[in-house]
Image: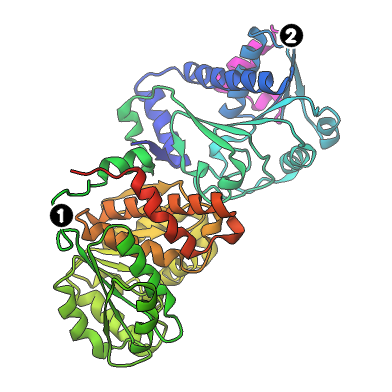
């Protein structure tokens, strides 16, 4: 599995590798800068450029930039300019070692004191290397540094840009904007992926992301907390169960889909369709009477049972739903249920009494508190978006965005719940303490009904025999892949949940194995 770390985790790994294990700090910097130089060389050749401009900060990120300058010079580049966004007495440690090495190589180093000094020297016919801040940035950029980054952003045209570790101005942990950020063509992240390479605003600025292996000791990597990984195709293929050659509809698993209201019949229909189209052998939908005909028009394969009230589900339906769960391996609860108090009573009762794994989404989450999540006797998966998560945790949305990993993991550990926090890049926090970041998906998936599909997919993979934590990873991966496929065909503006649904069988077929 591909390891991902926070900015703090990266510091812990470096400390263990260098101070405890005895790895050479200058050796690591040399390897990192050499990798940057190689990519710059290739980009210049591709774009027919012979000029490189490197922007360096005072820390190790700047040191990587100095090494890149040295290696490009050794490779025959004559037109290299290094711009230092720091005072000379601020350069220390390994970075100072390579800054000193520059002095004997006839490389022009310019210490920038004001924006005019920088802006007048920027070239259109140049490859830019962004080695200013790195992943350690943890506060908004202010003063001259902010002005300098804004200058780079404003005067950037078609110059290819290589970001070292992360585009400068992004949080290395949350991926949130902390100031003006230069759009990268390629980002080379050193040694291990950083969570800030994937989350929030990073998606808009990272460009092509490439991992540079610096051969850190495995036990140094284990020093990072939390234990976090990338949920990618390699991981999902390993945990996805094959389709049984001797299977039948009961062995393929049954899903109970509980939801809907007169005002919102589509959500539970989408969840139910996703469950069936992703491999569940049978789907039973428990819905209000007014939803039944709507659902059956779109899903003739469903078995539909109705509640007492024709427009909404209420706590009077509890006994019937509990009886139906005996035939099921997983339950979806919430899509389209609405916010009536009687519906809330049903949701809280099912949370405390359900005995099959429970996937709760949408309106189900509206009726719950963090304390409610502790009162359960089965595996629970919740799939809130940021706003729903903030309400559940009694936080401001901004507090969640500032620390999404920390917040999601806190809830998972405190309530023994699998928490899938949805966003432009989603993450899954497990009660075991592990976290997974999901890189699949497309902007067009920000559309009504997309989350309902995901809830149905998770329940389906549980019903097919996957462990709940594996089912979430599988479901999120193929949900995102289907969204990408729909966007490639239709364009992001035109994607609907129905389009994503139509592509789910196609992406699943790619990895289908019969056994």
Instruction: Tell me residue 504's x, y (percent).
Output: 39, 55
Which segment is the magenta one? 85-105
Asked whether 96 or 233 is in front, the reply is: 233
Q: Position of residue 424 (x, y in %)?
A: 52, 55
Q: Please, what secondary structure does the residue beneath circle 2 have? A: loop
Give the residue at mark 2: 106
Which is more toward the observer, 422 or 33?
Answer: 422
Whether residue 349 sits left or right of residue 127 in the image: it is left
State the image coordinates of residue 482 (x, y, percent, origin top left): 44, 53
Camera-near label (2 vs 1) is: 1
Q: How is the image coloured?
A: rainbow
| Residue 247 - label | 1
Left or right of 120 on screen, residue 150: left
Local secondary structure at mark 1: loop
Quadrant assignment for the C terminus: top left
Residue 100 within the magenta-colored segment of the rendering = yes
Q: Residue 269 magenta-drawn?
A: no
336 w.r.t. 309: above or below: above
Dot 1 crowding, Cα within 10 Å, few <14, some 14–19, many 20+ = few
Left-right relation of 43 to 279: right
- In which image quadrant can residue 95 be found? top right
Total numbered labels placed on residues in the image: 2
The residue that appears at 49% across and 68% down in the rendered structure is 387
Q: Crowding at label 2, few (<14), some or many (≥20) Cα neighbours within 10 Å?
A: few
Report the residue at 42% width, 61% height from top.
501
Indicate which disc, 2 or 1, sits on the residue closer to the N terminus: 2
Q: CA distance from mark 2 to mark 1?
A: 72 Å
Residues at circles 2 and 1 in contact by the CB criterion of under 8 Å: no
Is residue 214 among what the camera can see? yes
Q: Is residue 382 visible?
A: no
Where residue 11 appears, as percent x and y from the top left, is: 45, 35
């Amino acid at each position: 599995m591909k390891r991902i770390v926070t900015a703090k985790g990266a510091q812990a790994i470096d400390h263990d590798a260098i101070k405890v294990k005895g790895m050479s700090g200058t050796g690591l910097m040399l390897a990192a800068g050499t990798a940057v130089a190689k990519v710059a060389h290739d980009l210049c050749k591709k774009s027919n450029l012979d000029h490189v401009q490197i922007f360096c900060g005072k820390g190790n990120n700047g040191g990587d930039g100095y090494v890149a300058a040295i290696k490009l010079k050794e490779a025959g580049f004559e037109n290299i300019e290094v711009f230092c966004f720091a005072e000379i007495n601020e350069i220390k440690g390994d970075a100072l070692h390579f800054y000193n090495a520059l002095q004997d190589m006839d490389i022009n180093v310019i210490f920038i004191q004001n924006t005019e000094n920088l802006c007048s020297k920027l070239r259109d016919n140049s490859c830019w290397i962004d080695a200013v801040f790195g992943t350690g940035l943890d506060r908004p950029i202010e003063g001259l540094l902010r002005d300098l980054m804004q200058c780079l952003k404003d005067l950037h045209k078609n110059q290819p840009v290589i970001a070292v570790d992360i585009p400068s101005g992004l949080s290395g942990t949350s991926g949130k904007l902390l100031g003006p950020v230069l759009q990268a063509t390629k980002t080379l992240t050193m040694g291990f992926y950083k969570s800030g390479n994937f989350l929030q605003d990073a998606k808009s600025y990272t460009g092509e992301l490439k991992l540079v292996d610096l051969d850190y000791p495995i036990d140094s990597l284990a020093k990072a907390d939390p234990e976090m990984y990338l949920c990618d195709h390699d991981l999902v293929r390993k945990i996805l169960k094959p389709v049984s050659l001797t299977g039948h509809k009961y062995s393929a698993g049954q899903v109970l889909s509980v939801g809907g209201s007169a005002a919102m019949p589509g959500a539970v229909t989408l969840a139910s369709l996703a469950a069936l189209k992703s491999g569940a052998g049978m789907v039973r939908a428990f819905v209000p009477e007014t939803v039944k005909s709507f659902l059956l028009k779109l899903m003739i394969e469903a078995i539909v049972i109705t509640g007492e009230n024709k427009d909404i589900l209420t706590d009077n339906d509890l006994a019937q739903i509990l009886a139906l769960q005996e035939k099921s391996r997983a339950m979806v609860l919430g899509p389209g249920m609405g916010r009536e108090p009687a519906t809330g009573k049903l949701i809280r009762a099912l949370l405390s009494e359900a005995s099959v794994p429970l996937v709760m989404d949408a309106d189900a989450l509206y009726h719950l508190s963090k304390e409610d999540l502790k009162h359960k006797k089965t595996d629970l998966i919740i799939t809130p978006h940021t706003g729903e998560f903030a309400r559940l945790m009694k936080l401001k949305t901004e507090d969640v965005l500032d620390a999404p990993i920390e917040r999601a993991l806190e809830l998972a550990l405190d309530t023994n719940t699998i928490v899938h926090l949805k966003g432009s890049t989603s993450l899954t926090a497990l009660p075991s303490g592990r976290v997974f970041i999901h890189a699949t998906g497309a902007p067009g998936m920000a559309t009504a009904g997309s989350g309902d599909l995901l809830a149905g997919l998770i329940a389906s993979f549980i019903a097919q025999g996957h462990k709940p934590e594996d089912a979430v990873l599988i479901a999120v991966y193929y949900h995102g892949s289907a969204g990408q496929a729909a966007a490639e065909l239709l364009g992001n503006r035109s994607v609907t949940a129905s389009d994503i649904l139509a592509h789910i069988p196609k992406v699943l077929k790619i990895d289908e194995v019969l056994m």
